[in-house]
Image (cartoon, grey):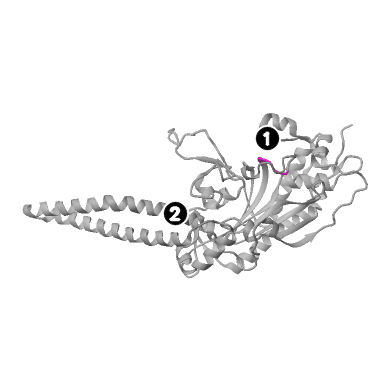
Amino acid sequence: MMDIKFIKENTDIVRETAKNKNIDVDIDRLLAVHRERLKLMQEIEQLKALKNDLNDMIKTAEADERQEIIEKGKEIKTKLELKEPEYDRMDAEFQLLMAKVPNVISEDTPIGKNSEENIETEKWGKIPEFNFPIKDHVQIGKELDILDLEKGAKVAGYRGYYLKNEGASLAMALMLYSFNKMIDKGYTPVIPPTLVKGNALFGTGYFKGLEYNSETDEIYQVASKDKDAEGKSSKDKKFLVGTAEPSLLAYYSDEVLKEEQLPIKVVGYSQCYRSEIGSYGKDTKGLYRVHEFMKVEQVVLMAADDEASIKMHDDMLAISKEIHEELGLPYRVLRICTGDMSTGKFRAYDIEAWMPSRNEYGETGSASNFTDWQARRLNVKYVDKNGEKKYVYMLNNTVLPSPRPFIAILENFQQKDGSVVIPKVLHKYMPGNIERIAPKT
């Protein structure tokens, strides 16, 4: 959420940002609604003040004065009955429009129409060359008996899968390795809830509007109702998260922190669920795009400082690069352009690992700087050294997801004899410290 004062003072910048992000929001209408909303609010407050004055007057009024006061009170009540619904309508439209207003972008964010105009900033690693016909991860997984897509589809439906034997161990090794690495980097480990209320998802920008919309939001809503602490049916709608980010950040919602507490650095492990409604027909084969997976995520809450947040953002990305290098996975980094950037992002990177069967890089992580856009929605503030309350800045980064690095390892490290070499940093997390997954004899 943006600050309405900032929008009023920087209308042209906000309008241009919306255009560059391909976001349809009428800024002029927003400002008009805001003015009318404030006018109605002031009128309602004045009427309520008069009503309170009349209530005080009637207590001491003479009998012949009371009827006149009562009549004035009725007039005020009638006016309030007209004004309050009008204000509610204006406020609802205001909130809806405000939810669409994009965060401004950093100076180094490229202007572009879509993902094809993202800018490659660096590459690392040598693309492997094979002296034998290569296999994709689906064939490798099936032949090594570590991946079962047929049974996955039978039990879970479209995009369902089973990881088994050394495949299950490899996926868990990736999670344990990356989780422990983040702890060593000074991040506080957390296993957060994956079933959350809507405010956590709206607050972090995973709803495109004020409420969940199954046509646009790639989120699963849980249909069954639960009970509250008193055993009554809960009115809260519940959702499955697509990443640990919403529940990690919402942990601090409605809190006022102290500046000396910042930055707060947290790493979370979670199961993740994504409906992938916007990706129908894409990447239908294998594990590249699935509904359910595991992921290690990092988030940072820090003081409101653009320059410092850019440095923190780069530092977070550096950890992802280090992880890919330790795994031996060739990768590239993309600076995300405006047309491929979501509403709340100030600055963003993607990191992509080489996947031989695709003959291209595939996204394995994303690092985003939201400045105070999420904090305003979640209402997370801090008191600075001058005693002033400010909204914190929030940043997040994919440390490592389970499926795509799994794909990259199987395909990049496949051997002529059908085995797959396991990256050295994962050996200690594998049963028996095995160094490769070999075909069953």
Residue type marked 2:
Gln
Would you say 114 lies left or right of 8 here?
Answer: right
| Residue at x 61%, y 65% (from the top left corner) | 309
Nearer the observer, 144 or 43: 43
How many angstroms separate mark 1 from mark 2 (CA)?
A: 37 Å
Q: Amino acid at mark 1?
A: Tyr
Instruction: Give the farthest residue toward the left.
Output: 64
Give left or right: position of 230 versus 277: left
Which quadrant of the rendered structure holds the C terminus?
top right
Say above or below: 354 vs 387.
above
Q: Which residues are magenta?
A: 288-292
Residue 308: name its quadrant. Answer: bottom right
Query: From where the camera sits, is residue 379 visible?
Result: no
Q: Residues within 10 Å of mark 1 (few under 14, many from 20)?
A: some
Q: How many marks?
A: 2
Q: Are marks 1 and 2 in contact (CB under 8 Å)?
A: no
**Residue 23 position in % (x across, y down):** 55, 56
Task: Mark 1 or mark 2: name the one nearer the start of the chain.
Answer: 2
Identify residue for label 2: 95
Lateral position of residue 435 relative to residue 385, left or right: right
Residue marked by disc 1: 158
Residue at 49 percent of width and 54 percent of height:
99
The secondary structure making up most of the magenta span is: loop
Helix, strand, or loop for circle 1?
loop
- Residue 433: within the magenta? no
- Residue 124 vs residue 81, the one in the foreground: 81
